[in-house]
Amino acid sequence: MSEDEKYMRRCLQLAANGIQGARPNPMVGAVIVAEGRIIGEGYHVRCGEGHAEVNAFASVKSEDESLLPSATIYVSLEPCAHYGKTPPCAELIIKKGVRRVVVGCIDPFAQVQGRGIEMIRKAGIEVIVGVLEQECQWLNRRFFTYHAKHRPYIILKWAQTANGFIDDHGRALQISNEHTQMLSHQLRAEEDAILVGHTTDAREHPQLTVRHWYGPNPKRIVLTHNRPLPQMIDDLYQHGIQSLIVEGGRQTHESFISSGLWDEIRVETAPFVVSGGTRAPQLPTDILLYNKVDYNGNTITFYRSQQALLPTSEFPT
């Protein structure tokens, strides 16, 4: 691992701490390095407050400020160049006079898209782009998908028995264990909205809350026949919903799959079987398995769409 990769991984660790507070802004981490050691670091804690670069510079001790002209600042996402709720981070970097800037990936947001990098380079500061680019893009896959595809990032999620049923002859079935139920509620706290079909809602009356985790409840949505799926997804986009969990039955999931409206699928499989019931949804063909984890006997398999892989930036390094 190179020095640049090592410090960019630290940026990613820091950025992930903003999973709840930074929304709808992206998660960003920043690390300032001089003379082989970290002299400042920070992340975007909460929307409307200081960005990662601001917090990193603020953490530099007074005795280390003289090192800034020889320092490198690592940022997981391109520094902003526009005035929003906070001043441009690109201007702050120039003002602080660091020697070098290393950026994980370009910001796809229309008001940035390379402008921050251009501004810093014009000031005579060296800029390197694309260090751990795919990892940086993956961290902000919700934000990237929302701005690139004009829809939420969609996670399909269901639980099934070892022989592939999601209920027991039409009766609701407790498949998740205590550990995986907690993880499900953690996921809910990290996403903007959650959806079930009208049949599931009428039959099971699911709460769809985060009662076994800490954080905000996702916006609750019930899919009905009165509104076509593409229209509903566009409505969510127009209302700023960047991510959506789908926890409905087979028909609801397959409507998303057949429409190509999904980015990630999480399937929990329990170690027991039932004699019959509703079959689990059929997995699509354009799918990539990227993780599989056992949680006290239940296995969660993580898939992602081939179409969800974000293109590498063409911005010159």
Image (tube, rainbow, N blue to C red):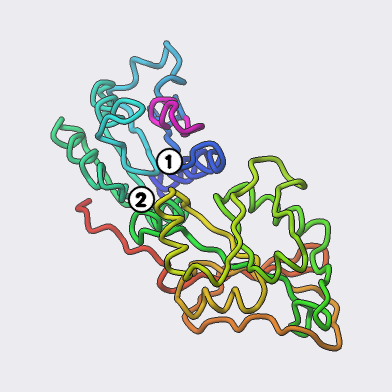
Report crowding for label 1: few under 14, some 14 to 19, many 20 or more residues within 10 A (C-alpha): some
* Comes first in the chain, label 1 or label 2: 1
Q: Nearer the viewer, residue 316 or 288?
A: 288
Q: Pinpoint residue 188: horizontal percent, then vertical percent.
A: 64, 52
**Residue under numbered circle 1:** 25
For the point 71% across and 84% down, the residue is 279
Report crowding for label 2: few under 14, some 14 to 19, many 20 or more residues within 10 A (C-alpha): many
Q: Is residue 250 above or below residue 200?
A: below
Q: Is residue 287 above or below residue 293?
A: below
Q: Which mark is residue 131?
A: 2
For the point 43% across and 29% down, the residue is 48
User: Is 269 inside the magenta-drawn segment?
Assistant: no
Q: Is mark 2 on a helix, strand or loop?
A: loop
Q: Residue furthest top?
A: 62
- Name which quarter of the figure residue 125 lies in: top left
Q: In this view, does 236 lie above or below 229?
A: above
Q: Residue furthest bottom?
A: 275
Q: What residue type is labelled 1?
A: Asn
